[in-house]
Image (cartoon, rainbow, N blue to C red):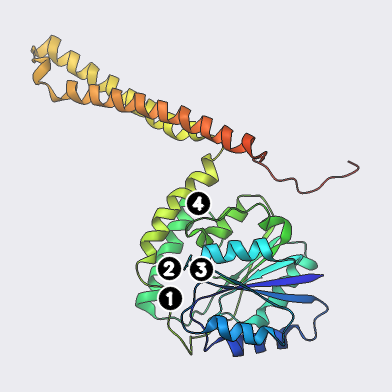
Amino acid sequence: MKISIILPIYNERENLPQLFREIEETFQNLPYQMEVVAVNDCSRDGSLELMEEMAKSRPYLKIISFFVNAGQTAAFDAGFKHATGDILVTMDSDLQNDPRDIPKMVDLIVNEGYDYVTGWREKRQDGFVLRLLPSKIANFIIRKVTKTKLKDLGCSLKVYRRQVVEHLHLYGEMHRFLGVLIESMGVKVAQIPVNHRARTAGVSKYGINRTFKVVLDLLTVWFMKGYKTKPVYVFGGAGLFCFGLSFLSLGISAYQKLVFETKVHRNPLFIISMVLMLVGVQMLALGLIADMLMRTYFESQNIRPYIIGKKVNF
């Protein structure tokens, strides 16, 4: 069995030698083949040159380098597509994730039958204001909206069965929602506490602004998880709601005209009812267009909105 470790790397030159030493020490006594797919996200500190030099004596090290900085999601996606292992591992390259946690996570897939195992940084070693507090807020919001049972959605240390990542299509900043997307596939998911270490070299690439990105991406994940194959339910439901409010407002306006002789053209409820009716028509039309786009997406690429887990005597 072969294990692929995917490392997104952005200006981590100072951490790379120790990181590769720890990975080698972790796997030297394990009965697995190992490869590392290092994705250089346009580093400017010499990380690429250092890895190229290291690759001369490390045949397991494969390097992908982007022309422009594309972000962690793109790095994961490139790693997934170029990895050749039966089991895939993602982790950060800043030494905060501990490679020694990988064997017990792989064991859950190999021996316990899980398809996806994610780490839970139970004792995080990060600054409270800039890292820990925004992460806790984001995790709370995501859990409430998506109903996920995963506790730490920001931990990059994850292990996947290959069949799972083959069905992932990552865009934007969707790496934060990998657990939610995989959980929605119906595969067997586990989460375990992992060691988390304080950063000793380099600087963090994350700021408080990532909280706003998480909120925006959350809307996409919520829609994709529940309504990807039936968008008309969202837009059509909003349209019918607007129609209901429109008729209610129109009814009150008519009552006021007949009973109190209120001038219709001076009654704001009448104007509101007309606006709501127009919005309702637009929402229904948008729902139908989205439904047709969804069908085109699936049928043109021969994609199916389901995943087959097993076939017997087929």
**Mark toward the start of the polypeptide (2 vs 1):** 2
Residue 286 or residue 111, whichever sits in front? 286
Pointer 2 with pointer 4, Cβ within 8 A: no
- The quarter of the rendered structure image containing the N terminus is bottom right
Quick one: 147 or 202, which is closer to the camera?
Answer: 202
Q: Are marks 2 and 1 in contact (CB under 8 Å)?
A: no
* Residue nearer the viewer, 51 or 73: 51
Which of label 1 and label 4 is nearer to you? 1
**Which class describes the residues within 10 Å of circle 3: few (<14), some (14-19), or many (20+)?**
few
Residue tagged by mark 2? 136
- Report the residue marked by disc 4: 146
Q: CA–CA distance between discs 2 and 3? A: 34 Å
- Please tell me which of labels 2 and 4 falls first in the chain: 2
Secondary structure at numbered mark 2: helix
Residue 281 lies, with reference to residue 215, above or below; the image says above
**Residue 157's x, y, as percent?**
60, 72
The amino acid marked with disc number 4 is Thr
Q: Position of residue 100 (x, y in %)?
A: 67, 83
Q: Residue at x 51, y 55 (%)?
A: 171
Instruction: First in sequence, mark 3 or 4: give its number.
Output: 3
Residue 26: which quarter of the image? bottom right
The quadrant holding residue 115 is: bottom right
Q: Amino acid at mark 3?
A: Phe
Separation (CA) of disc 1 from disc 3: 19 Å
Q: Which mark is residue 67?
A: 3
Check disc 2: other Cα within 10 Å, few if <14, some if 14-19, many if 20+.
some
Mark identifier at residue 205: 1
Contact (Cβ within 8 Å) of mark 2 with mark 3: no
In the displayed structure, does residue 54 sit left or right of residue 267? right
Residue 186 position in % (x across, y down): 66, 50
Query: Mark 3 falls on what kind of element?
Result: loop
